[in-house]
Image (cartoon, rainbow, N blue to C red):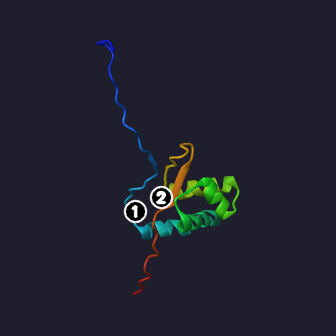
Amino acid sequence: MTSNEKLVCRKPVVVFAGHSGSNTTPQERFERLIELPPSAKLVYRVLTEDAPMTQQQVRTDALLPARTTRDALMKLKDENLVEERLYLPDARKRLYAPLEVERPDDETE
Protein backbone atom coordinates (compact mmCIF):
# COMPACT_ATOMS: atom_id res chain seq x y z
CA MET A 1 0.00 0.00 0.00
CA THR A 2 1.41 3.38 -0.96
CA SER A 3 1.24 6.44 1.25
CA ASN A 4 -1.49 7.96 -0.96
CA GLU A 5 -3.83 4.98 -0.61
CA LYS A 6 -6.33 5.02 2.20
CA LEU A 7 -7.76 2.03 3.96
CA VAL A 8 -11.52 2.36 3.99
CA CYS A 9 -13.47 0.40 6.56
CA ARG A 10 -17.16 0.17 5.78
CA LYS A 11 -19.72 -0.91 8.30
CA PRO A 12 -22.71 -2.97 7.18
CA VAL A 13 -25.84 -0.92 6.68
CA VAL A 14 -29.22 -1.99 7.99
CA VAL A 15 -32.09 -0.43 6.07
CA PHE A 16 -35.51 0.25 7.50
CA ALA A 17 -38.02 1.87 5.18
CA GLY A 18 -41.19 3.57 6.25
CA HIS A 19 -41.86 5.26 9.56
CA SER A 20 -41.29 2.47 12.07
CA GLY A 21 -40.66 4.89 14.92
CA SER A 22 -43.54 7.22 14.17
CA ASN A 23 -45.30 9.15 16.90
CA THR A 24 -48.76 8.02 15.84
CA THR A 25 -50.90 6.22 18.37
CA PRO A 26 -52.58 2.85 17.80
CA GLN A 27 -55.95 4.65 17.89
CA GLU A 28 -54.89 7.04 15.11
CA ARG A 29 -53.67 4.11 13.03
CA PHE A 30 -57.03 2.36 13.55
CA GLU A 31 -58.85 5.40 12.18
CA ARG A 32 -56.63 5.35 9.09
CA LEU A 33 -57.09 1.60 8.62
CA ILE A 34 -60.88 1.77 8.50
CA GLU A 35 -60.66 4.35 5.68
CA LEU A 36 -58.62 2.03 3.42
CA PRO A 37 -60.07 -0.23 0.70
CA PRO A 38 -61.04 -3.84 1.50
CA SER A 39 -57.90 -5.27 -0.14
CA ALA A 40 -55.65 -3.27 2.19
CA LYS A 41 -57.69 -4.37 5.21
CA LEU A 42 -57.36 -8.01 4.10
CA VAL A 43 -53.59 -7.67 3.67
CA TYR A 44 -53.35 -6.07 7.12
CA ARG A 45 -55.38 -8.94 8.59
CA VAL A 46 -53.13 -11.56 6.93
CA LEU A 47 -50.05 -9.79 8.31
CA THR A 48 -51.46 -9.76 11.84
CA GLU A 49 -51.83 -13.53 11.75
CA ASP A 50 -48.36 -14.51 10.53
CA ALA A 51 -45.92 -11.58 10.30
CA PRO A 52 -43.31 -10.80 9.19
CA MET A 53 -44.04 -11.87 5.62
CA THR A 54 -42.72 -11.17 2.14
CA GLN A 55 -45.02 -9.76 -0.53
CA GLN A 56 -45.24 -13.19 -2.16
CA GLN A 57 -46.23 -14.83 1.14
CA VAL A 58 -48.92 -12.20 1.69
CA ARG A 59 -50.21 -12.70 -1.85
CA THR A 60 -50.40 -16.48 -1.37
CA ASP A 61 -52.20 -16.26 1.98
CA ALA A 62 -54.61 -13.50 0.91
CA LEU A 63 -55.34 -15.09 -2.49
CA LEU A 64 -54.90 -11.71 -4.19
CA PRO A 65 -53.25 -10.83 -7.51
CA ALA A 66 -49.69 -9.46 -7.35
CA ARG A 67 -50.68 -5.93 -8.35
CA THR A 68 -53.48 -5.74 -5.76
CA THR A 69 -51.16 -7.01 -3.03
CA ARG A 70 -48.43 -4.55 -4.01
CA ASP A 71 -50.93 -1.67 -4.06
CA ALA A 72 -52.40 -2.65 -0.69
CA LEU A 73 -48.96 -2.87 0.92
CA MET A 74 -48.04 0.54 -0.51
CA LYS A 75 -51.22 2.08 0.93
CA LEU A 76 -50.58 0.47 4.32
CA LYS A 77 -47.01 1.75 4.26
CA ASP A 78 -48.12 5.26 3.26
CA GLU A 79 -50.54 5.32 6.19
CA ASN A 80 -47.85 4.06 8.58
CA LEU A 81 -49.73 0.84 9.31
CA VAL A 82 -46.95 -1.59 8.41
CA GLU A 83 -43.20 -1.69 8.89
CA GLU A 84 -41.05 -2.63 5.92
CA ARG A 85 -37.57 -4.07 6.37
CA LEU A 86 -34.95 -5.86 4.36
CA TYR A 87 -35.34 -9.62 3.82
CA LEU A 88 -31.82 -10.85 4.59
CA PRO A 89 -31.86 -14.11 2.56
CA ASP A 90 -32.72 -12.11 -0.58
CA ALA A 91 -32.06 -8.36 -0.49
CA ARG A 92 -34.36 -7.81 -3.47
CA LYS A 93 -37.32 -8.64 -1.24
CA ARG A 94 -38.81 -6.91 1.78
CA LEU A 95 -40.50 -8.17 4.93
CA TYR A 96 -43.69 -6.56 6.13
CA ALA A 97 -45.05 -6.50 9.67
CA PRO A 98 -48.15 -4.70 10.96
CA LEU A 99 -47.94 -1.89 13.47
CA GLU A 100 -50.39 -2.12 16.34
CA VAL A 101 -53.84 -0.63 15.93
CA GLU A 102 -56.40 -0.15 18.66
CA ARG A 103 -60.07 0.71 18.44
CA PRO A 104 -60.65 4.00 20.26
CA ASP A 105 -62.93 3.90 23.27
CA ASP A 106 -66.41 5.10 22.40
CA GLU A 107 -66.95 7.51 25.25
CA THR A 108 -70.23 9.34 24.92
CA GLU A 109 -71.28 11.93 27.42
Identify whether 36 is placed above or below 66: below
- The quarter of the rendered structure image containing the N terminus is top left
Front in this rendered view, residue 14 or 9: 9
- What residue appears at the point 37 percent right and 60 percent down from the top-left corner? 23
Q: Quadrant of residue 50?
A: bottom right
Q: Determine the secondary structure under disc 2.
A: loop
- The residue indicated by pointer 1 is 24
**97 relative to 41 in the view: left or right:** left
Q: Determine the secondary structure under disc 1.
A: loop
Q: Quadrant of residue 2?
A: top left
**66 relative to 47 in the view: left or right:** right
Identify whether 87 is placed above or below 7: below
Q: Quadrant of residue 72?
A: bottom right
Front in this rendered view, residue 4 or 96: 4
* Marking on residue 106: none
Identity of the residue furthest to the bottom in this view:
109
- What residue appears at the point 61 percent right and 66 percent down from the top-left corner? 42
* Marking on residue 80: 2
Front in this rendered view, residue 88 or 15: 88
Front in this rendered view, residue 28 or 45: 45
Using a 10 Å C-alpha cutoff, classify the residue at mark 1 as few (fewer than 14 neighbours), some (14 to 19) or many (20 or more): few
- Residue 84 position within the rendered picture, expressed as x and y whole percent measured from the top left: 49, 53
Q: Amino acid at mark 1?
A: Thr
Q: How many marks?
A: 2
